[in-house]
Image (cartoon, helix red, strand yellow):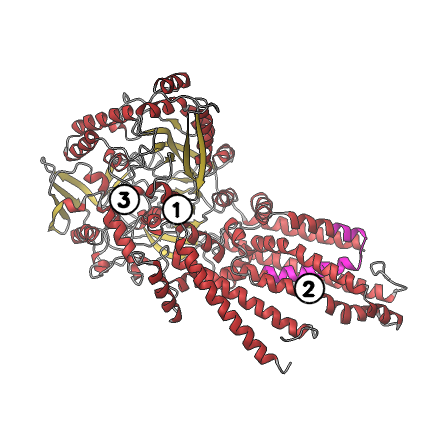
């Protein structure tokens, strides 16, 4: 691992270059897409007197040519300023900052839960292949895998929210009471239950299938047969060797999913009225809120790039076969 | 052993299931009102742009602004002008001087006194910063504003402008505090605290705004017309209509602020404890012919199309029967201005065919005379209308291509551009027929004249009508306009819309209900009261205990679930140990 530092530096520069390219590309795609933000901001037609519309255009600097706007944007970005959102009348960083935690709460929790549960079930199934338990699990996973996530969400809402009234289905906090302290935490956890369950269930099958397949593959390896022939305890073989090798593919998936922690829950956020980034992105797109859109894409790009970097580095530690090139 | 585990888990689950519903208590039955206290939760479709209600069009904010701020005068649900900050007003006989007499016990939410100077300031700010109401109230037409005393405002107009008071009562005219906005150079400066923390005079004050989740308002104890009955109003922000509907059905909201999918209305009507109130509004769906495109510049073609479309079918199929068939060229909801004699052509496809034949639009080999493009934005009603129109016009030999666009793209192609033959739009046509002018005269994008209709007589009539103070005289001119529109048919009105008000029956006193109708503005909930509140004589109760029970029950459930998990894990361990102990050979799962 002594040549790790240059590797990290090289990968770091690559990451920064990628992000820069994405910024430029985003800027042009967003600004050249059809649709005029000022017309959307001006809203209801009865009020569209030219003075009002022009005043708006000037306020947001949309009277300047695109190239000049790109220059201003990049310059501001270098100074750590992501601009002002048209829609929220607030600095973009502030708008995103208000939502980012809510999204991470959903995505991280479900990502970790899906990983743990999916991998455990995969291992469990792999060791009981062909038995009824395995068949039942495989079937359930196939079902979950083929279910669109919004539909799964609505099913959970109808059953646990509307029918049983066990869990709240919209928002992050109780509306009728304002809790503080431990009650507030409990309130948020309670509201999290259904969206997190939806996301977890939707992600489970990937981990399950990958883990199961790779565990079975390891069972067939020569080294396992050799160990068995030596009379090693099967639990030891499994925990010390098979599991360690079989865990690599699910970790790759985990790393890939990690890139989507900021944007991946959009549909679920919409269904559950969750005040997160995914919904913000959708609103920003409808509203043609250029600065906010660019800010969101920037944050997402950074998170994907970082997740990739992190996954690669983790691999270096976990799999000695990976060469640092 | 496995069975035992399953049974115990099922038992645990059952126990937790029975625990939770006890946390819900319901109030119902006949209760004498009004009562004090309670929280009203509204499932609201969008988030305000800011808390400066006069600076920009902010439809999602309007309902919330209306509770925090007041106007000089406001509109009730029937669009009559009623008192707000002014309890009385007079108009001089020449229509040039408006005198408003203001309540003298009004305070801003921060404790400052409200005076006539705030009114003068607001109107001047609308002019200076080109506010939303700039055009509607014709700010440039205001000669000067005088404040002879702290509670009298005199507005002098340069020329008479009859709809002035209606537009003052409508949109973008909330009175703002001079002591907050007085010195700003830009009233939408994002650094202005007032954009996030409003200071108004209204019955409710802002308590918190959790972006994307909710906005909480609390009763203003010092409201100048008495404290509102409710303690709190929470606007829960749920942009998705289906999600909002589910949340309402699950009891998380008391008012459904969305227009629900029309297919859900019967279900809502059957739900106990839910009221679905329906009422016509001055808003309608209408079709716009692009008169710049041939052959739509020919009035015979427009007439034939009007005859080929069965408007009752559109109401039945696109609106699920919720709506009225449009018969005239202005909305009947503004009754005094509606001309019942200016009728649209009756449905008659044979006659339509005859007219087109006579006009020389012969059918080609494929049976079509010509092709037109229908462009609308996404939405179940818009898309359904497109289908019906396509089918109807096929019968008279017109081929229709349907293009569905996302809203801002629609704005670009249709409103700003010219890439359509016809489209459908809806929109508010009140509070005064003067508003119709924006839809049938002028040029897009400055006006909403999507048909590019130009008729000098119509323009003249609108101009004249605005200057006449006498309503009967004005009515004559607006009636004439409607007759001309019925002849020229630049637009084909289709459906008179109805509004759905969906709420729980344990709340009373909404602006549209008998006990409050005409007394409050159409968004004003200060007379709304809850059956679970305390009778007015007694002091208001402290927090209901049920709220804590919910939390305690929740914690209990968590404890139970965690315990169950531990239990299962323990069993699992035991099982593994057993298996290891009695291990005899290769497990089945392992392939040799």
- What's drawn in magenta, residue-wise? A110-137
From the viewer's side, name the closer residue of A82 and B394: B394
Q: Main secondary structure of the magenta part?
A: helix
**Could you say where residue B290 lies in the image, as x and y percent from the top left?**
33, 34
- Residue A282 drawn above or below residue B490: below
Q: Quickly name the residue at label 1.
A: B408
The correct choice, above or below, for B445 with respect to B361 in the image is below
Q: Tag 2 or tag 3, which sits nearer the N-term?
A: 3
Looking at the image, is B156 positioned above or below residue A219? above
Q: Determine whether the residue tagged by mark 2 lies in a helix, strand or loop.
A: helix
Task: Tell me where residue B550 appears, x and y as whole percent.
Answer: 54, 53
Asked if residue B481 lies left or right of residue B568, the reply is: left
Query: Which of the chains bears the disc numbered 2?
Result: A
Q: Which residue is mark 2?
A: A249
Q: Nearer the viewer, mark 3 or mark 2?
A: 2
Screen quadrant of the N terminus of chain B: bottom right
Asked if the residue at tag 2 contacts the one at tag 3, i.e. Cβ–Cβ closer than 8 Å, the answer is: no
Q: Disc 1 on helix, strand or loop? A: helix
Q: What residue do we see at 33% from left, 62% from top?
A: A68
């Amino acid at each position: 691992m002594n040549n790790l530092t240059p590797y990290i530096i090289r990968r770091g520069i690559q990451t920064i270059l990628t992000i820069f390219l994405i910024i430029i590309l985003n800027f042009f795609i967003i600004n050249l897409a059809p649709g005029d933000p000022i017309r959307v901001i001006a809203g209801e037609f009865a009020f569209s007197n030219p003075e009002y519309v022009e005043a708006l255009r000037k306020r947001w600097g949309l009277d300047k040519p695109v190239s000049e706007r790109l220059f201003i944007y990049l310059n501001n970005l270098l100074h750590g300023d992501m601009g002002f959102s048209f829609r929220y009348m607030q600095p973009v960083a502030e708008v995103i900052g208000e939502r980012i935690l809510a999204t991470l709460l959903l995505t991280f929790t479900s990502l970790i839960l899906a990983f743990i549960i999916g991998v455990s079930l995969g291992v469990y199934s792999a060791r009981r292949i062909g038995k009824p338990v395995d068949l039942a699990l495989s079937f359930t996973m196939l079902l979950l895998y083929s279910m669109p996530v919004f539909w799964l969400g609505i099913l959970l809402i109808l059953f646990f929210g509307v029918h049983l009234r066990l869990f709240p289905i919209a928002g992050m906090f109780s509306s009728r009471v304002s809790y503080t302290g431990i009650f507030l935490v409990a309130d948020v956890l309670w509201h999290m239950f259904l969206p997190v369950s939806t996301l977890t269930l939707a992600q489970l099958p990937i981990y399950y299938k990958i883990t199961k397949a790779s565990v079975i593959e390891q069972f067939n390896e020569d080294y396992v047969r050799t160990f068995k022939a030596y009379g090693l305890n099967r639990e030891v073989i499994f925990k010390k060797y098979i599991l360690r090798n079989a865990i690599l593919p699910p970790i790759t998936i985990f790393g890939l999913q990690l890139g989507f922690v900021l944007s991946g829950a959009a549909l679920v956020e919409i269904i559950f009225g969750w005040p997160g980034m995914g919904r913000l992105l959708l609103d920003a797109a409808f509203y043609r809120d250029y600065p906010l859109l660019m800010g969101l894409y920037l944050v997402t790009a950074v998170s994907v790039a970082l997740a990739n970097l992190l996954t690669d580095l983790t691999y270096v530690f976990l799999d000695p076969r990976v060469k640092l090139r | 052993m496995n069975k035992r585990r399953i049974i115990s888990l099922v038992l645990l689950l059952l126990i937790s299931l029975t625990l939770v519903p006890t946390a819900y208590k319901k109030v119902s039955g006949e209760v004498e009102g009004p009562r004090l206290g309670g929280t009203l939760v509204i499932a609201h479709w969008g988030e305000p742009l800011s808390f400066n209600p006069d600076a920009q069009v902010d439809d999602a904010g309007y309902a919330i602004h209306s509770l925090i701020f007041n106007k000089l005068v406001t509109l009730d649900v029937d669009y009559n002008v009623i008192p707000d900050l002014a309890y009385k007003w007079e108009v001089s006989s020449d229509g040039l001087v408006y005198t408003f007499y203001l309540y003298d016990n009004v305070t801003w939410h921060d404790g400052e006194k409200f005076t006539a100077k705030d009114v003068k300031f607001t109107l001047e700010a609308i002019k200076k910063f080109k506010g939303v109401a700039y055009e509607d109230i014709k700010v440039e037409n205001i000669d000067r504003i005088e404040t002879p005393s702290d509670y009298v405002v005199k507005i002098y107009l340069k020329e008479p402008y009859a709809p002035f008071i209606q537009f003052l009562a409508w949109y973008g005219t909330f009175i703002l505090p001079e002591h907050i906005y007085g010195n700003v150079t830009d009233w939408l400066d994002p650094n202005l605290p007032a954009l996030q923390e409003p200071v108004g005079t209204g019955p409710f004050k802002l308590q918190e705004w959790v972006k994307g989740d909710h906005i909480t308002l609390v009763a203003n104890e010092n409201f100048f017309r008495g404290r509102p009955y409710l303690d709190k109003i929470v606007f829960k922000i749920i942009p998705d209509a289906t999600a909002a509907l589910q949340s309402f059905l699950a009891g998380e909201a008391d008012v459904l602020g969305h227009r629900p999918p029309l297919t859900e209305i019967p279900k809502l009507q059957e739900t106990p404890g839910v009221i679905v109130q329906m009422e016509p509004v001055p808003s309608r769906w209408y079709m716009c012919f692009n008169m710049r495109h041939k052959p739509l510049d020919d009035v015979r073609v427009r007439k034939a199309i009007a005859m080929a479309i069965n408007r009752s079918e559109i109401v039945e199929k696109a609106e699920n029967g919720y709506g009225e068939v449009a018969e005239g060229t202005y909305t009947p909801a503004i009754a005094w201005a509606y001309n019942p004699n200016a009728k649209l052509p009756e449905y008659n496809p044979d006659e339509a065919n005859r007219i087109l034949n006579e006009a020389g639009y012969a059918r080609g080999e494929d049976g079509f005379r010509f092709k037109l493009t229908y462009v609308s934005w996404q939405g179940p009603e818009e898309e359904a209308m497109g289908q019906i129109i396509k089918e109807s016009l096929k019968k008279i030999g017109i081929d229709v291509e349907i293009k569905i666009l996302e809203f801002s793209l629609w704005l670009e192609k249709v409103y700003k551009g010219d890439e359509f033959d016809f489209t459908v739009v809806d929109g508010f046509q009140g509070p005064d027929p003067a508003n119709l002018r924006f839809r049938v005269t002028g040029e897009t994008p400055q006006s909403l004249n999507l048909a590019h209709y130009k008729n000098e007589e119509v323009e003249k009539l609108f101009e004249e009508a605005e200057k006449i103070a006498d309503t009967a005289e004005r009515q004559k001119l607006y009636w004439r306009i409607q007759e001309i529109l019925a002849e020229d048919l630049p637009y084909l009105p289709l459906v008179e819309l109805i509004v759905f008000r969906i709420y729980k029956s344990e709340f009373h006193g909404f602006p549209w209900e008998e006990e409050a109708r005409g007394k409050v503005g159409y968004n004003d909930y200060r007379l709304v009261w809850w059956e679970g509140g305390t009778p007015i004589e007694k002091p208001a109760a402290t927090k209901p205990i049920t709220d804590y029970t919910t939390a305690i029950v929740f914690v209990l459930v968590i404890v139970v679930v965690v315990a169950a998990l531990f239990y299962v894990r323990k069993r699992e361990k035991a099982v593994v140990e057993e298996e290891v102990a009695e291990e005899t050979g290769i497990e089945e799962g392992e392939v040799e």
